[in-house]
Amino acid sequence: MVDSEVLDRVKGCLLGGAIGDALGYAVEFSSLERIRVKYGADGIADYELDPTSGEAIFSDDTQMSLFTAEGLLSAVKPGEPLDFDAAIRSIHLAYLDWLETQRSRTARTDEGASRLMREPKLFRDRAPGTTCLSALRSGNCGSPEAPINNSKGCGGVMRVAPIGALNANLSDAEVVRLGAAAAAITHGHSLGYMPAGVAALAVRRLIYAPTGSVVETLRSSCADALALFADDPNVDALKSLLDKALDLAARGGDDAENVAAIGEGWVGEEALAIAIYCAARWENDFSRCVVAAVNCDGDSDSNGAVAGNILGAALGASRIDAKWLEKLELRGLIEEIAGDLANGGRGRDR
Ligand SMILES: [Mg+2]
């Protein structure tokens, strides 16, 4: 029996990421100046709905997060220990399924296909990252030990929240390693995969070990996750950027200026730091958090996705304004997957 508060936070994490992604996707390639010309001085603060479906559509960030979840769920059973290597192989296979959704425009109908591969709305081009596409097309599976390339794009950190959201008997170090390894499947630079380890641990603690202070949990997650990468030559750069994000959040001031001082978010360390800034700054206000994350010159949808994952995990779906949930595409599917993650595995064979 899943604790209802845990389930609420797991749903908040997945839905929150999809909401931030969908909000930001409308302005992913717009400068802040252009965003303000179009939406006013406060920038974009509500969905730009898809004219055909009338829904808020999300991008590759959420697509790939769902495939991370599905890969993970294929490798675990409720109450049983997780086999690390099997989990990574399974996540890689799920990413190859996602690659198939970008090559084909037709959902599968056969019984053997996963629920994601039977969903026509996932067979859509939503500005997928070129590093993810090229790494997966190679057929190889990268790892921190055998980097597939030298990319530190944010395509790793944007998709690993389900790893922290899984209800499994894992140590903190295992969660960090799994998050980093899932990112390293496609991103070989340590600033591409270390942020994913940090994000997975932050989500994990916010859902399964809440202390009441989001800021303190974020601070301890950053410190403890980075301690596991102490030998990495880039760990100090990541640590300084995360410290800067937490300091700016504590100081307050103008979000757009603070986000710009951190970066744009196209690379892993900046997307994580911007998300942590927004979640720490607005720890009790989901809407202000995602609005702060997407109104920038940079990678609005990924910044929004990671910020939404983190604060959604902290607050739970019940503290996300209904206006964000009502128009979100595939909300039912996202909630079903969240239920399986909270359950520690699929409730029944699919
Ligand atoms: Mg995207």
Image (tube, rainbow, N blue to C red):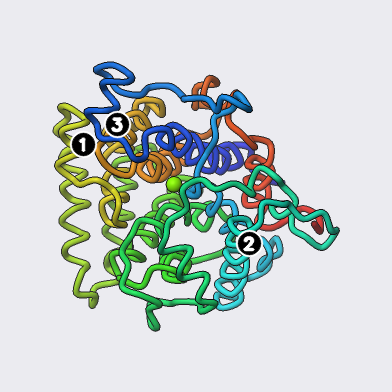
133 over 54 or under it: above or below: below
**Left or right of 295: which side holds 99?**
right
Q: Which type of secondary structure does the marked residue at label 3 adopt?
A: loop
Dot 1 amino acid type: Ala
114 over 329 or under it: above or below: below
Q: CA distance from mark 3 to mark 1?
A: 16 Å
Residue 308 picture quarter: top left
Residue 225 percent across, percent down from the top left: 33, 63
- Asked whether residue 178 appears in the rendered view, the answer is no
**Which is nearer the N-term, disc 1 or disc 2?**
2
311 over 61 or under it: above or below: above
Dot 2 amino acid type: Glu
Q: Which residue is mark 2?
A: 100
**Which is nearer the N-term, disc 3 or disc 2?**
2
Q: Pointers 3 and 2 in contact (CB under 8 A)?
A: no
Q: Pointers 1 and 2 in contact (CB under 8 A)?
A: no
Residue 4 percent across, percent down from the top left: 63, 37
Residue 153 percent across, percent down from the top left: 33, 59
Q: Which residue is mark 1?
A: 249
Residue 90 picture quarter: bottom right
Q: Pointers 3 and 1 in contact (CB under 8 A)?
A: no
**Left or right of 346: which side holds 311?**
left
Dot 3 amino acid type: Asn
Tell me what residue is drawn at x 24 percent, y 75 percent.
232
Q: Nearer the viewer, residue 105 or 183?
A: 105
Image quarter of the C terminus: bottom right
Q: Which type of secondary structure does the marked residue at label 2 adopt?
A: helix
Q: Which residue is mark 3?
A: 295
**Which is nearer the N-term, disc 3 or disc 1?**
1
Categorize mark 1 by other alpha carbons within 10 Å: few (<14), some (14-19), many (20+): many
Q: Which type of secondary structure does the marked residue at label 1 adopt?
A: helix
- Asked whether residue 341 appears in the rendered view, the answer is yes
